[in-house]
Image (tube, rainbow, N blue to C red):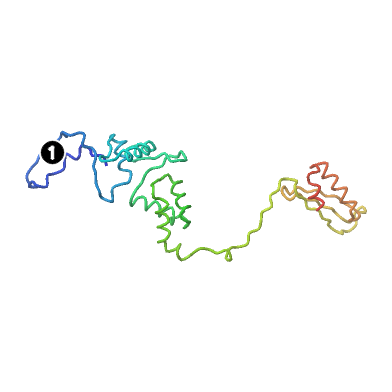
Amino acid sequence: MAADHLISRLENPYENVFDPKEITETFPLETLSVLTSKDQSTPWFADFANYHAGKFIKKGMSTQEKNKFFKDVKHYFWDDPFLFKTCADQIIRRCVDGKEALEILEACHSGPTGGHYGANFTAKKVFDAGFYWPTIYKDAYELIKSCDACQRQGKISQRDEMPQNAIQVCEIFDLWGIDFMGPFPSSRGNKYILVAVDYLSKWSKQKRSPTNDARVVVKVLKILFTRSGLREQSEAIA
């Protein structure tokens, strides 16, 4: 957006283009470094870029507009050839506009890593990619409205959702499983094996027993309590 020395090489359209001309190597008005245009293709950040690139301010702004301009421009900085903004989350993102912005938005929505998510999540993916423009949420919403795959899928109702089961969160030695195995052929008078297994670490404790009654279970619980503490008493008994 900032004019440079190459503007002096523009040909005069009112002269005969076939006449030989010498290239002007000097540019008399060095202050003419700002190009103004009412074209819709002009980037939204043109005023910020001109200010940081050449300290030029758009003419005709009111006092209120100037105050807002200087309040906003301090969040931007120029690193040739791009303009960057320090966003509210203190992350620096590159400012984009026009076709480039739409291509980035489409890639974050329906690209190989897109996933056809909603407007807010798609905009978040653009921010995570390091790009910024002020109408990103509006553009994401309009893109999703025109996305054929998203419109065909529709919104999943609560009736179509799969039932969700809560995941039990526990620490080591919080939950035990205790059960008898047997009867087996008698071996030195023992016919049963009592097995206690920790659910998380899969650590196990075994005890041989001639019977499968509560007295054997109590003996094993005493061993577990002395090793792991009384914290697991209710769980182990259950």
Q: Few, some or many C-alpha atoms within 10 Å of disc 1 (few <14, some 14-19, many ≥20)?
A: few
Mark 1 residue element:
loop
The quarter of the displayed image where residue 70 is located: top left
At 47% from the left and 52% from the top, the residue drawn is: 120
Number of numbered discs on residues: 1
At 68% from the left and 49% from the top, the residue drawn is: 169
Q: Residue 93: x, y in percent?
A: 41, 42
Label 1 sits on what residue type?
A: Ile
Quadrant, the N terminus: top left
Q: Residue 216: x, y in percent?
A: 89, 51
Q: From the image, tell me which residue sits under label 1.
A: 23
Horizontal relation, residue 101 to residue 90: left or right: left
- Residue 54 sits above or below residue 180 on the image: above
At 51% from the left and 63% from the top, the residue drawn is: 155
Q: Report the front residue among 212 and 17.
A: 17
The quarter of the displayed image where residue 61 is located: top left
Horizontal relation, residue 43 to residue 86: left or right: left
Q: Residue 178: x, y in percent?
A: 81, 53
